[in-house]
Image (cartoon, rainbow, N blue to C red):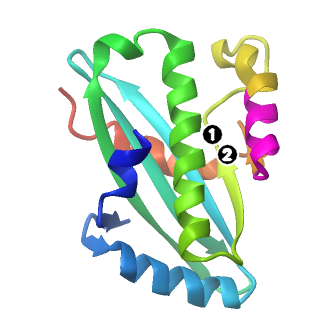
């Protein structure tokens, strides 16, 4: 999946308008110079014939009155993602790859990864939390999970579109 995302030159802004990665890079550079953290969120939605994955690059800082994001969707055949672990780990891999793209474009960025994984036992994804936390922190990124993973909620809104 990472190669697909890395080779895409166009993303969309929160309104669905196509923007170039160069435009995002400029926006991100200006934001990081102001001291802002770049938030990367991912989520997925399994449909009957496909699984929609969405990555989000978000800028949010109340003190600077900044709140905007960009997203990219990737569709994969659904059969391989019927396994929850496979689907969640693919989301995490997508988040790490997106965060790596952010750092390649803006090496001074402080990046925080947000994934749709719960902490409560009743949540089916909670059994993967320890592994995911070690994986993401081992690479050097900060991690947020439910209920604090708001950037993954942004991604969630775009996974539900284009039902198939």
Give whichever of 121, 1 is nearer the camera: 1
- Residue 138 magenta-drawn? yes
The stretch in magenta equals 132-141
Query: Which residue is at 45% across, 41% downward?
Result: 156
- Residue 27 magenta-drawn? no
Give whichever of 82, 99 is nearer the camera: 99
Give whichever of 143, 150 is nearer the camera: 143
Q: In which quarter of the image is the C terminus?
A: top left
Quadrant of residue 54 within the rendered picture: top left
Q: Is residue 122 left or right of residue 116?
A: right
- Marks 2 and 1: in contact by CB < 8 Å? yes
Count neighbours of disc 1 (C-alpha within 10 A) and say few if under 14, some if 14 to 19, many if 20 or more.
many
Q: In which quarter of the image is the N terminus?
A: top left
Give whichever of 154, 136 is nearer the camera: 136
x and y percent of residue 14 in the render?
Answer: 38, 65
Q: Name the residue under label 1.
A: 115
Q: In this view, does 12 lie to the left or right of 122?
A: left
Query: Which residue is at 40% across, 16% downward?
Result: 81
x and y percent of residue 3 in the render?
Answer: 38, 47
Q: Mark 2 points at which residue?
A: 149
x and y percent of residue 104 in the render?
Answer: 56, 69
Q: Earlier in the sequence, mark 1 or mark 2?
A: 1
Disc 1 to disc 2, C-alpha distance: 6 Å
- Per the image, label 2 sits on a secondary structure element best described as loop
Query: Which residue is at 73% across, 11% downward?
Result: 122
């Amino acid at each position: 999946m990472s190669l697909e995302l890395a080779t895409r030159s166009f993303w969309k802004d929160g309104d669905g308008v196509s923007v170039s990665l160069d435009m995002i890079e400029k926006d991100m550079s200006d934001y990081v110079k102001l001291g802002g953290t770049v938030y990367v969120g991912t989520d997925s939605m399994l449909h009957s014939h496909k699984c929609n994955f969405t990555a989000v690059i978000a800028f949010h800082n109340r003190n600077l009155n900044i709140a905007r994001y960009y997203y990219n969707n990737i569709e994969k055949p659904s059969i391989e993602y019927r396994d929850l672990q496979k689907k969640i780990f693919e989301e995490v891999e997508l988040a790490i790859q997106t965060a790596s793209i952010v750092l390649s474009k803006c090496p001074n960025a402080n990046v925080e990864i947000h994934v749709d994984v719960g902490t409560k036992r009743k949540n089916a994804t909670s059994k993967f939390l320890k592994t995911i936390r070690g994986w993401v922190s081992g690479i050097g990124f900060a991690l947020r999970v439910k209920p604090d993973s708001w950037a993954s909620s942004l991604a969630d809104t775009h996974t539900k579109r284009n039902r198939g």
